[in-house]
Image (tube, rainbow, N blue to C red):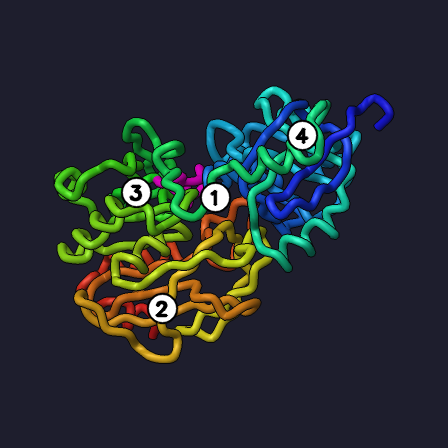
Amino acid sequence: MDNKAAAFLVLGDGRIFEGYSWAKEGETFGEAVFSTGMTGYQETLTDPSYHKQIVVMTAPHIGNTGVNKSDEESEKIWVAGFVVRNPSPIASNWRSEKSLEQELIESNVVGIQGVDTRALTRHLRDQGAMRVGIFSNTNLSREDMVVKVRAVKPMSGAYLANDVTTKKPYVISPPSGVATRFKVAAIDLGIKGATPKAMAALGMQVHVLPLKTTLEEIKALSPDGVFLSNGPGDPAAMVDVIDLVRGILVEEIPFFGICFGHQILGRALGFETYKLPFGHRGINQPVIDLTTGKVEITAHNHGFAVAAPKESEFHTVYGNGRVTHISLNDSVVEGLEMISVPAFSVQYHPESAAGPHDASYLFERFAQLMSSPQLGLKENNA
């Protein structure tokens, strides 16, 4: 690191971690979050849900397999900054096309290396996710850096999906040899590339639509179901999409939401959402499916949760529903389903990028719901 400039990671509570410049030098700001996945860093970087977030990787060695186009989940890197302890000096994998640092530099992503990421993660776990800045090759005093970080807008109240949604509709069709069984309208709040591909593999023709798509435009497609994707920001700020989901529930169009889409369904049903202390991020989060009793290891990236009752069925203006999935780490609600109307959601990523595959059955459950929407999910869970 002799040729690397000094760098500083500055938290909103005034704590400063010292390290060395990595990737692009400069300044960057966002919300500090940590990801506990040991692999899948490229999928994390290109996941639009990480927009405006500076990601701390808890695994100490990052970058050993390089990067390649095939593992990208969107057209660009979305993280506001990247924090690692020991970046790999080499990229050794037959699929690697360039080094991680080269990709970050070309994408103008400011990073920092040499940070005690274990201590940083423990601090965020104890004090909660907070505003953060990375400064490298800077002449600013420590006090000035803290002042700049504290001027950053917090994630609460942030409306960010408009930054990441597709600008125009596009279609992902089933691959050769797979018959088209369903037409799905997928509202893009920050969708990962693997998600429509996973649905298409099951015979769904997926129409990926901008977040401003209206209910009338959706109905004009005559879809068999509506899918609401993951995405960044505060679900409470998504008033327009919440109203859209309420219209879908009234029309009784089969509905499936994941991650951000799960939180928006919760608000559409009348529940509050709240900011988690440090969120769930990474590909090793344990969740129990209460409808089957099975435990899944799942991929998460969310900082908010739905305040729905877990002990019994709940009643809404759209009929009765229930909580279907619970986090085994902190008992947060991770899944909802309606009984009277065809709708369900989970607060994680079943598309298995970058793994694991435990939750892929949820796309099949969506297909079952579209096949027999009037039967609800009770029969599908039998």
Q: Residue furthest bottom?
A: 312
Q: Left or right: where does residue 97 sit relative to residue 264?
A: right
The residue lying at 59 percent from left, 22 percent from top is: 108
Above or below, 379 against 74 in this view is below
Q: Name the residue under label 1.
A: 154
Inter-mark Cα distance, 1 to 2: 25 Å
Q: What residue type is labelled 2?
A: Ala
Mark 3 against mark 2, which lies toward the viewer?
2
Q: Farthest residue toward the front?
A: 143
Circles 3 and 4, Cβ within 8 Å, touching? The answer is no
Sequence-wise, the earlier of marks 1 and 3 is 1
Q: Name the residue under label 2.
A: 308
Disc ID at residue 135: 4
**Front-lying residue, 109 or 340:** 109
Label 4 sits on what residue type? Answer: Phe
Q: Is residue 340 above or below residue 366?
A: below
Mark sitting earlier along the chain (1/2)? 1
Please state if 258 lies on the left or on the right of 371 as rendered. Answer: right
State the extent of the magenta-drawn residues as a range. Answer: 189-198
